[in-house]
Image (cartoon, grey):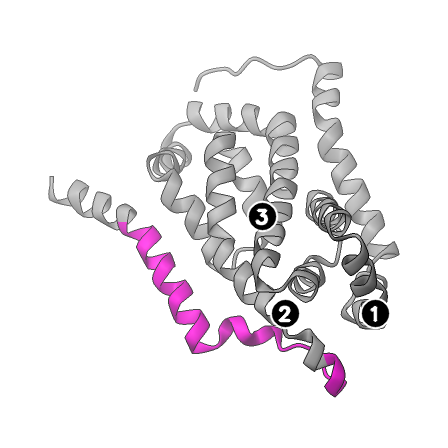
Amino acid sequence: MTDIPQAPPRRASLRLLPLVVILSVAAIGYFTLRDYLTFEALRDNRETLLAFRDSHYLWTVLGFIAAYIAIVGFSLPGATVATLTGGFLFATFPGALFNVTGATIGAIIIFLAAKWGLGDRLAARLEASDGAVHKLKQGIDENQWSVLFLMRLVPAVPFFVANIIPAFVGVGLARFAITTFFGIMPGAVVYTSVGAGLGSVFERGETPDLSIIFEPQILWPLLALSALAALPIVIKALRRKGA
């Protein structure tokens, strides 16, 4: 196994600082903000939000995207509520575009922090390793586009996990950003459309049905997209087996 040069301790600590800050803010936010970034808070402040949007549309858009970036970039609670808010304030479109933009930029922040702090060194160790670990790394490298799209399309993969794993296996920024933006779009459109219908939900005194993503008419197209993303992996495996 090839030795990997070690960074000086002080420099290594500095490289870890952004990731430590993100995790620290996430922990603080979990205990301090979880009661504020809720559906109930959106319901109680809906008239104020709509009035501000009508008077200052551009500032509302910019403020909303900035808030979404902060929520995702620091892994704060309330991402689902933010997505619903995007639909409530801006309709399915352009609300979905604002949601995807904020989520993608926030994801990039986590990705870069993880890549700068640990990712490059860990990827180098995986590349230099032997046996099953090296084969796993090689398999991901050969199918990066498909693997990245699968992580975004499959609802079972937590968003935070899908942000840091690519950083740990040496994925490039451009590829990560592209697959994140387009990979999260189908789910974002679904939840944004739920947010766009919150007006009637508020009037009935109900809560939105977020399990809609598991309804057959929604789930099956997502699974079909996942299968399409996985197709290149299957084809490569069959070709290798037949060679």
**Is residue 215 found inside the magenta-colored segment of the image?**
yes
Residue carrying label 3: 161
Q: Please tell me which residue is depicted at 45% across the width and 35% down the height of the picture.
A: 175
**Three-letter amino acid code at the position of disc 3:** Val
Q: Please tell me which residue is depicted at 58% across the width and 64% down the height of the picture.
A: 92
**Three-letter amino acid code at the position of disc 2:** Ala
Q: Main secondary structure of the magenta part?
A: helix
- Near mark 1 (Cα within 10 A), the count class, few <14, some 14-19 or many ≥20, is few
Image coordinates for residue 3, horizontal then vertical, percent: 50, 15
Instruction: Identify the secondary structure beneath mark 3.
Output: helix
- Nearer to the camera, 123 or 97: 97
Instruction: Identify the secondary structure beneath mark 1.
Output: helix
Q: Please tell me which residue is depicted at 77% across the width and 60% down the height of the picture.
A: 54
- Residue range highlighted in magenta: 202-231
Q: Earlier in the sequence, mark 2 or mark 3?
A: 3
Q: Earlier in the sequence, mark 1 or mark 3?
A: 1
Q: Looking at the image, which residue sits at the far bottom?
A: 204
Instruction: Identify the secondary structure beneath mark 2.
Output: helix
Q: CA distance from mark 1 to mark 3?
A: 35 Å
Q: Looking at the image, which residue sits at the far right?
A: 32
Residue carrying label 2: 196
Tag in front: 1 or 3: 1
Image coordinates for residue 192, horizontal then vertical, percent: 60, 64
**Three-letter amino acid code at the position of disc 1:** Glu
Q: CA distance from mark 2 to mark 3?
A: 28 Å
Quarter of the image that includes the N terminus: top left
Residue carrying label 1: 47
**Is residue 129 found inside the magenta-colored segment of the image?**
no
Does 73 sit above or below residue 43?
Answer: above
Q: CA distance from mark 2 to mark 1?
A: 15 Å
Image coordinates for residue 111, horizontal then vertical, percent: 60, 36
Quarter of the image that includes the C terminus: top left
